[in-house]
Amino acid sequence: MSEAAVGYTKEHGERFVEELKELLRIPSVSTAPEHVGDVRKAAEFVADGLRAAGMEKVRLIETSTTARKGHPLVYAEWLHAAGKPTVLLYGHYDVQPAEPLDEWKSPPFEPEIRDGNIYARGAVDDKGQMWMHVKALESLLKTDGKLPVNVRVMIEGEEEVGGEGIAAFVREHGDQLKADAALVSDTEMFAPELPTLCVGLRGMIYTELEARGAATDLHSGMYGGAAPNPFVALAQMIAQMKREDGHIAIPGFYDGIEEPTKAELEAWRSLPFDEEAYRKHEVGSTELTGEAMFSVLERTWSRPTMDVHGIPGGFIGAGAKTVIPAKATAKISFRLVPGMRPEETFAKYKKFVEEICPKGIQVKVTMIHSGEPIVVSTDNKYVRAATDAMAKVFGKETVFVRGGGSIPIVGDFVRELGIPTVMMGFGLPDDNLHAPNEKFHLANFHRGIESIVRFLDGVGAGS
Ligand code: BES
Ligand code: MN
Ligand code: MN
């Protein structure tokens, strides 16, 4: 029974945190070529943890895409619960870059505990949450000598760069991941103390829009006024794509969008959401922007959007240089909602920028990565096992929300593997994902482990 396992999680909780700290010291930034070795080190660390927990067939699976060699997947299994369902546990051990470094109160790869929170890049997204899965398995295996269900574990190292490696693996070797349900802990709770299941994620396309003007950089005094400027061209194109009222002006962009049901919208309205506190304390801006006829939750969960992440190129050093750069590139992404397809959105966007491209400028649009939007079913026994488990741990009813972020592989779990997916996450709204001073509330780390133990137990008991 899980009570012994729950006891074990409490007895060994401090060690679990020490291990997590060790993992957080490895800068496994998947997008940075200089960190390939660290990414692999993190994969080995996770594999060792799974072996120590008592999992079987633990191995690294190499990945590659047409473009490049990928980061390894970590696989493990325990399949001796005859007649019981098989649960696929998913997480990621890669992290986002930590920059800007001078905004961190303690260095991003030197985890520090302050006020019951552990601060480090990857603390909540997703090393801390992934480690909860490993520790839940350990707690069950070390106390019962077995698991209540069959378990496969798949942890990837490329989630933060689009997850192409794992997608290829799922497409080609889906049979090796046969499972009845998937459990993902890579989302947030709606509010502290409020157990939450995430039932939808936005999809995305991440692109680069390159603009070229003159054949070479030019003196801006000698040529300014006559030569095309690719930065100005990018600004003009971007401004035409997203209007000031938040509407995306790409023709057909909103075609086919599926609205949330009345019941879902009604449920969102009853969530404890304080828009002014959100503006002030989470966003920290003077105003919120976007489509005024939609609520903030709709704008971030069920409406698509476009954002610009950076415009590399030209002169960015200290001081001044009077130059008209030959080339500039904008990193632009779109978040997609159900009813939208990544390839179709990309085609509409590409056609539009080619049409509005200013005189004397050549544009090139490249897709960096993409992922499908997803809504998961809430009417199955796995969701019930999750809400039962969290009711025991938090003493509260679970709320159902969507997330504005993306986890590309979740769409493949649902579409390719055809399995219900439970997104039971323990992050908090102010955990600073992808930002300086990322943290994980340690109480939630421990409650997460207990919830996962109880979830697996509940699934095994057929509740
Ligand atoms: N864990 C996040 C996604 C997330 C965050 C979902 C909060 C729901 C609520 C994930 O690690 C992430 O950041 N994904 C990227 C995906 C992209 C790089 C393909 C994202 O959403 O930007
Ligand atoms: Mn994540
Ligand atoms: Mn992330």
Image (cartoon, helix red, strand yellow):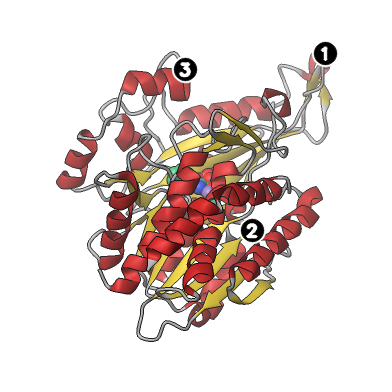
Q: Quadrant of residue 113?
A: top right
Q: Amino acid at mark 3?
A: Ser
Asked if the residues shown at circle 2 and circle 3 are in contact, with their CB atoms under 8 angstroms apart, the answer is no
Q: Which residue is mark 1?
A: 319
Q: Residue at x 45, y 79 (%)?
A: 178
Disc 2 crowd rating (10 Å Cα; few below 14, some 14-19, many 20+) is many
- Nearer to us of marks 2 and 3 is 2
- The quarter of the picture where the C terminus appears is bottom left
Q: Which residue is mark 3?
A: 285
Say left or right for 184 vs 110.
left
Whichever of labels 1 and 3 marks the residue nearer the N terminus, that label is 3
Viewer-proximal residue among 236 and 203: 203
Numbered badge on residue 157 = 2
Q: Amino acid at mark 1?
A: Gly
Q: Quadrant of residue 157?
A: bottom right
Task: Quote the CA–CA distance across marks 1 and 3.
Answer: 28 Å
Q: Amino acid at mark 2?
A: Gly
Task: Quote the CA–CA distance across marks 1 and 2.
Answer: 39 Å
Whichever of labels 2 and 3 marks the residue nearer the N terminus, that label is 2
Q: Residue at x 58, y 73 (%)?
A: 55
Give x and y (percent) for residue 442: 52, 40
Question: Does any atom of ligand 1 lie closer than 8 Å to the CB of label 3?
Answer: no
* Above-or-below relation of 458 to 365: below
Under circle 1, the secondary element is loop
